């Protein structure tokens, strides 16, 4: 059964960077895109982008361009999200999620990681 | 960006009764090339990540109880829970995956009356 396990909670100062990891198990990691979604205050979900672990290709939401980097290490079945120049509005729960479908750039997500709380505060 | 709007924002339904959640997109999610609507539904319980319920607007994900069903086309979609169970208390989201950026509805909180 496919599973995604994320790294633990982070507290960062404004202007700093954060790197969240997402370790996959139970399926061929290189075969499916990993997407990143965050849940900000309240309950809204915000898509950040996708990454193909096999070839390293990425696609980022425009509002995060220049601040976000999505990478992977296929030797340890792990994807990474790095967000720089953090501000208080970046305080959120960050999720990785697998896109379990071929042939389309975008898709639905299944499964999701358990989430990583990132708090940005001075 | 495609704007996804859910209604209502919150809903209270008695156990065993039907629950209906609506989702409207700002442009059609129907793609003629594959005759599908690019819409998914998720359930998020407190303290848990979202769980996929429905994709292609009406295809139930593996392991999802058949009391959950999705319907609709183009810009108007519905998630129906035919007979509400206590474990269905959650926030429900629709998501479009036709165009980047992927966008979600604001969520509908479902409670027991």
Image (spheres, coloured by chain):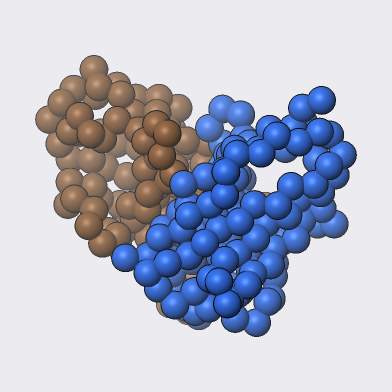
- Residue A81 placement (x, y as % from top left): 67, 56
Task: Locate residue A46: give its quadrant.
Answer: top right
At 18% across and 22% down in the image, what residue appears? B14
At 37% across and 43% down in the image, what residue appears? B43
Residue A21 in the figure: left or right of residue B39: right
Is residue A67 in sight in this rendering?
Answer: yes
Task: Locate residue B63: give its quadrant.
Answer: bottom left
Is residue A62 in sight in this rendering?
Answer: no
Q: Which chain is blue?
A: A
Quadrant of the frame with the C terminus of chain A: top right
At 29% across and 60% down in the image, what residue appears? B61
B95 vs B23: above or below: below
Q: Which chain is brown?
A: B
Residue A99 in the figure: left or right of residue A70: left
- Residue A20 placement (x, y as % from top left): 64, 52
- Residue B105 placement (x, y as % from top left): 51, 42
- Report the front residue among A100 and B55: A100
- Report the front residue among A24 and A57: A24
What is the tally of numbered marks visible in this picture? 0
B15 vs A40: above or below: above
A14 vs B77: above or below: above
Quadrant of the frame with the N terminus of chain A: bottom left
At 60% across and 81% down in the image, what residue appears? A54
- Report the front residue among B91 and A111: A111
Q: Residue furthest left?
A: B16
Q: Residue furthest top?
A: B113
- Residue B9 placement (x, y as % from top left): 45, 27
Residue B55 in the figure: left or right of residue B84: right
């Amino acid at each position: 059964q496919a599973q995604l396990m994320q790294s633990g909670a982070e507290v960062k100062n404004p202007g700093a960077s954060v790197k969240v990891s997402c370790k996959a198990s139970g399926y061929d990691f290189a075969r499916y895109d990993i997407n990143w979604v965050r849940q900000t205050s309240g309950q809204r979900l915000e898509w950040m982008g996708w990454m193909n672990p096999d070839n390293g290709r990425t696609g980022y939401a425009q509002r995060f361009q220049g601040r976000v980097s999505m990478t992977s290490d296929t030797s340890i079945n792990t994807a990474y999200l790095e967000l720089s120049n953090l501000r208080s509005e970046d305080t959120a729960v960050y999720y990785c999620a697998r896109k379990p479908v071929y042939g389309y750039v975008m898709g639905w997500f299944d499964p999701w990681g358990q989430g990583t709380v990132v708090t940005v505060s001075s | 960006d495609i704007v996804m709007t859910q209604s209502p924002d919150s809903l209270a339904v008695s156990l065993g009764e039907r629950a209906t959640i609506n989702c409207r997109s700002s442009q059609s999610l129907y793609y003629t090339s594959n005759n599908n609507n690019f819409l998914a539904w998720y359930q998020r319980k407190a303290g848990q990540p979202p769980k996929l319920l429905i994709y292609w607007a009406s295809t139930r994900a593996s392991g999802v109880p058949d009391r959950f069903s999705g319907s609709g086309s183009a810009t108007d979609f519905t998630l129906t829970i035919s007979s509400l169970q206590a474990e269905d208390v959650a926030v429900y989201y629709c998501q479009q995956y036709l165009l980047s950026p992927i966008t979600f509805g604001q969520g509908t909180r479902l409670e027991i009356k």
